[in-house]
Image: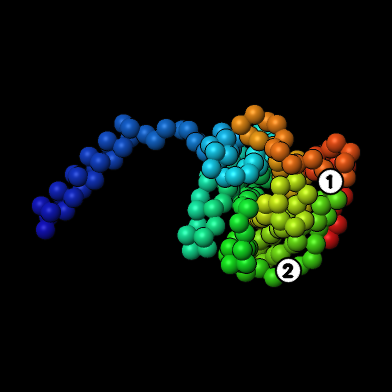
Amino acid sequence: MIAMLFTVLLTAGAVAAFMAMNPEPDTTYERDEDVAEAARGAAEVAGYAPIAPDLTEEWTANYARWEVRPEQGVPVWEAGYVTPSDTFIGFAQTDEANPTWLTAETDGAPSSGAVEVDDVEFEARETEDRQYYILDAEQNPVDDTTVVVSGDASEEDFTFALEEVLDALGEDPRDGSAAEGTEDSAGDGTSAGQQPSADTRV
């Protein structure tokens, strides 16, 4: 028993000495996906202009991907961001939305009203710790896609994100130009989401 104890202590001491000679690097790695680059790739297969919101440098993207959800039969372009306040906001965009996909995307959250941003109406849904804002295809004045913006961020961060999502609608990420058929229906030459002011109401 004494010999076994001595051997264990000797081994632990050797491991500790090795770890001391090879300390962990004092470096924090922060993942930041290139959403615009990923959107350019998705644009080749999406059939619409995948949105790439022009968020500030304080927003970091932790994923950006084109994904086909076989359980709902819905192809989706999506990205997720860590906000400056260290919370999360992500979006999912598709031109093939169906009720099953929408329920899954919002975790079955009940409706809590409507929010209007730049004269565009989003349906609001919420759970105890998460908010969802749905731009239905019928309410989308640009490209008839459905967009779900979700997360646990502040109202201020959500308002900013929703404005930038609207600004990005219809912008072809391959060349930055508006995709065909994305002129504002009012006929004043401005694109949806580019109005001079924002008005957010519940």
Q: Residues within 10 Å of mark 2 (few under 14, many from 20)?
A: few
Quarter that holds the C terminus: bottom right
Of helix, strand and loop, which one carries label 2? Answer: strand
The residue drawn where x is 66% and y is 61% is 130
**If you read the primary sequence from the N terminus, does the residue marked by circle 1 or circle 2 appear first?**
2
Quarter that holds the N terminus: bottom left
The residue drawn where x is 54% and y is 38% is 44
The residue drawn where x is 73% and y is 68% is 111
Q: Where residue 111 is drawn, which disc sits there?
A: 2
Task: Name the colouring of the figure.
Answer: rainbow
- Does any portion of residue 100 appear in the rendered image? yes
- Does any portion of residue 34 appear in the rendered image? no
- Look at the picture and state if 114 lies above or below 93: below
Judging by the rendered image, the residue that carries numbered circle 1 is 185
Quarter residue 10 falls in: top left
Quarter residue 114 falls in: bottom right
Residue 136 appears at what percent x and percent y?
72, 58
Query: Which residue is more in the foreground, 112 or 8?
Result: 112
Q: Give the residue type at disc 2.
A: Ser
